[in-house]
Amino acid sequence: MDILFQANAFIVALALYAGAALLSLFAGWQLRDGGKVANRVAHFGACVASLLLLVFSIGVFLDGEGKMLSFASPFPDISFAFRIDGLSAFFLGLIGGIAALASWFGVAYQKHFIGKYDLGMFGFFYNAFLLGMVLAVSANQALFFLFSWELMSLASYFLVIFDREDSRNIRAGFLYLLMTQLGTVFIAIALFLAYKATGSFDFDVWRATGLASLSPVWQGVLFGSVLIGFGTKAGIIPLHIWLPEAHPAAPSHVSALMSGVMIKTAIFMIIRFFFDFFPGAPLEWGLVILVLGAVSSLLGVLYALSEHDIKRLLAYHSVENIGIILLGVGAALVFAGYGLQDFFVFALVAALFHTANHAIFKSLLFLTSGVVVGVTGTRNMEAYGGLIRVLPYSAFFFLIGSMAISAFPPFNGFASEWLVFQSLFVGVAASSLLVKMIFLASIASLSFTGGLAMACFAKAFGITFLGRRREEHLSERAPEKERMNWLVHLPMIILATLTLVLGIGAPFVVSFLVGIVASLVFGTGGETLAFPYLQFMGMSENFAGILPVHGTAVALAVFVAVIGAVIGWLTRKRRITLAPTWDCGMPLSSKMQITATSFSRSLVVIFRGILRPTKQTDVEYRDAETRYFTSVHSVKTDFFDVYRSYVFRPIAQALGYFSDRVKKIQSGNVNAYMFYVFMTLILLLIFTTR
Amino acid sequence: MSENFLGIFFLLGIIAFLTAVFMHLVRRSRSLVRLYALQSFAVSMTFFLLGFLGGDRSLMLVAAAIIFLVKVIIAPAFFGKILRKLSGSSSTNNYLSTPMTLLVLTGLVLFSFSKVFLPLSAIYPQAFVSVALNIALVFISIFLLINRRGVFAQMVGMLSLENSIVLFAAFFGLRHPLPLEIGMIFDIVIWMVIASFFLGMIYRQFGTLSTADMKRLTE
C-alpha cells in the first residue's frame, strides 16, 4: 500500500486521466457502436484515476508529509511544479472522491446519449476537465496554474454544450465561456501583480517573500483581481449569472462535479492568496468578503426559492453555499487582522468543512435530480408530482440531500453551518462598530438563509415527489417502478451515508481540518502536517459543542428511542385504513394540489423588493366580440433580471460603444496599420528605457 | 578593431543610411531598386570586412558572398523583370510632401540619437554614433513602409528594414551562425517570389499598385 502514498500514485492518476481521455476519443472515432465503449472507457477510467487520487490524498495525511514534485518544461518561465500540502491534499481528496462517484454514475447516465452524440469526444473533455481541476489545486507555479485553470474552464465549456440540440444549452455555454474568460483576465492580472512583487512565478517564492511589498494601491488592485477572477468561477453575486445557466445545461453528473468541486477550486485559490501568499492581509478585505458572502448566501437562496427548474434551483443553492463558505473565509481574515489566531483557525475550518459538505450533498442532489430529469424528460418542477411512487430510492436520497443542505441535524450541513455561525458570533464582540454591524448583518443573513433553504427544499421535495402526478404523459416514460441499480444508486448511497457520517463525526472532522489549517498558516512550511493541533483543540472550550455526541446527547437519543418504542407498542394493534381524500364531491385532480409557484408565492411577495417578480396575463375568448366566455387564461410569471439589466447590459453597451469608436482606426489601409505598429514600437522603447 | 577599420564601417553605415533616406525621395521604382542594391552592397561589404578581421573568417566571407549574390545581383534583376511587366505603375508617391518627409526623417534621426538609446551604447562604447545611425536606419526603413503609397515601394522598404537589422546585428557582434544567415537569405528569396506573385495578383485585381486605392480590402 505504501506505493499508493507516494508521489508516483499522483503521477499515475494524472496519466490515467490523460489516457482515458485519449482512449475514449480513439474508441469513439474508430468503433461504430454509437459510443458504448467510449462511454465506459471515459467513465471507468476517470473513476479509477479518481479513486487513486483519493487514496493518494489520504496517504498524504497518513504519511504526515506533503509532496513536492517538479519537472522541467520546454517553455520559458513555465515549470511543471507540484506541491501537495495539507490544503491541496484536502481538495484533491474532495475532487477524487466526488469525481469517482460521479464517474461511476455517469456510466449509466450517459447511456441515453449513445448513438445521439459523440461520446468519445465527451469522454475526452470529461477527463480533461478532471485533469484540469487536479492540476489547478496542485500546481506550484503561476503560469502552470493558469494553464491548468484554462484547461479546466475550456473542457467544462465543451461539457456544458454537449447536449447541443437544445439551443438554450449553446447560449448557456457561450455565457459561461464569456464569464470564465472575464475571470481569467482578472486572475492573470493578479498573478502578474504577484510577479511584480516577487520577481518570480514560483509559488514557493511568493510564500517566502509575501506580496506585501506592493504599494497599498496595487494591493487593492490585487485584492480586487483575485476576488473578481476567482469570484466569477465561484459564483459570487453579481458574478454568478453563468452558474444557473451552465450547471443545468450540462449532464447531471457533470453538474455535480461543476457545482460540487469545480467552483471550490476558486475557494481554494482565494484561501491560497489571502492566507498563504499574503499572510497579514488587511482586515478590511475580510469585511468585504463577509459582505459579499452574506449577500450571496441570502440572494442565492431567494433566487432558488423562486425557481421551478430543478437544476437551476440547485445551481442557485450553489451560490448560496459559496456565500456561506465566504462568510467563514471573511471571518477568518478579520480575525487574522485582529491577531485572534484561535478564532481565525476555527473560522477557516468552518469554511473548509462547509466546502466539503456542500460538495457531498450537492453532488447527491444533482445525481438524484439527474434520475428525475431522465425519467420525466423535463426540468420543470411544475410537471412533476407523485414521483416517489415511481422513484422511491431517488426520492429517499433526494430527501437526505435536502435535509443536509437545509442544515437539519444530525446531517453534515448543520455541523458546518453551526460552526460558521459560531465564528460570526465571535466577531460581534469586535470593538469597531462597523465590524460589529457587518458581523451582525452576516448572522442575520445566515439565519434567513437557513430558514429559506429549508422552505425551498420542502418545496423541491414536496412538489417533485409527493402528491399526484401532474403530467399524465410522464407515466408513459416511466412505466416501471425504479429498481435498485448499483451503477446509479451506489454513488447515492455513499454520498447519503457521508452526509450522516460527517454530521455525527463532526468533532473528528474539525480536529482533522484544524491540522490542515495549522500546517498552512503556522510556519510548518506545508511540507509537514505533523502539527500539534490537539493543543488548538483546547480552545474548543470557547465554542458550543458542534454536535451532541456528549453524554447528554446520548441520553436524549435513548429517551427518544424509548418513547418511540412505547408508542409503537401501544399502537401496535391499530389498523391503517386507506381512503380517498374528501374534496366536496368533485373528482380528484392533480390541478387541485399546490404548485411550485404557489408554494413560494408568499415568500416571493415578502421579498418582492429584491426578487422583482413580473406577471403577464393573457386571455383568449371563445366569443371574440362580446368577450363573455374565456377559452384560455394564461399567467406567465417571471423575475426581473437585475444583474443583466443594471450590471452586465450597461457594461456590454459601453463596450459596444467603445468598440464602434475604436473601429474607426481600422481603415483598411496598410500604411495606417504600419503607422500604428511603428508608434507602438516608439512608445514601448520610450517606456522601457524611461 | 583599429580606428581605420572603424572609419570604414562608419562609412558603410553612412552609405546604407543615405540609401534609405533617398528611398523616400525618389519617385521611380527603378531608382528604388538601384538604391536597394547599393544598400545591400554596403551590407555585404560590412560582412566581408568583418570576416576579414574576425576569427571565423571563412564563415563570414561565405555569408558576405551569399548576401552579395542574392541581394545585390539576383533581387535587383528579379525586381527589374517585374517592373518591366508592370511598367504602367512603376512610379509612386508619398503620403507626406517631400519637405514634410524630410522633417519626419530629421525627427527620427534626432530620436535615434536621444538618451532613449543611451543604454545601447554599452554594446560598443567607442562608436555610439554608429549605433545611433543603425537605429535611425531601422526607423527610416519602417517609415518607408508607412509613407509610400506603392506596394512595390513597401516591398523594398521591408527588405531595407531587413538589411538594417542584419547590419546592426553584424556590426555589433550579434551575428548569427552561418546556417541561420543562409536560412534568412533563403527566406528572403522565397519571400520575394511570393510577394512578386501577389503583386501580380493585386495588379490584376485592382489595376493599380497604390495602397491608397486599396482601402476596400476590409469589406
Image (cartoon, rainbow, N blue to C red):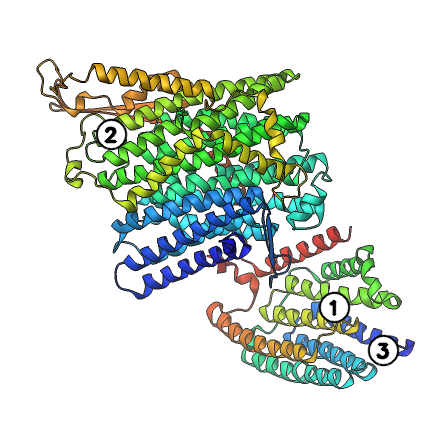
Label 3: how many residues lie within 10 Å, few (<14), some (14-19) or many (20+)? some
Distance of label 3 from label 1 (alpha carbons): 20 Å
The chain identifier of the residue carrying mark 2 reads A
Q: Amino acid at mark 2?
A: Phe
Label 1: how many residues lie within 10 Å, few (<14), some (14-19) or many (20+)? many
* Residue located at (87% from left, 78% from top): B5
Distance of label 2 from label 3 (alpha carbons): 94 Å
Label 2: how many residues lie within 10 Å, few (<14), some (14-19) or many (20+)? many
User: What is the x, y in percent for residue A532?
Assistant: 63, 35
* Residue located at (71% from left, 68% from top): B25
What is the residue that sits farthest to the right in this orientation? B3
User: Do marks 2 and 3 share a chain?
Assistant: no
Is A4 above or below relative to A173? below
Give the residue number, with chain letter if any, for mark 3: B8
The chain identifier of the residue carrying mark 1 reads B
Judging depth in this view, the residue of A381 and A362 nearest the camera is: A362
Give the residue number, with chain letter if any, for mark 2: A465
User: What is the x, y in percent for residue A683?
Assistant: 71, 52
Give the residue number, with chain letter if any, for mark 1: B21
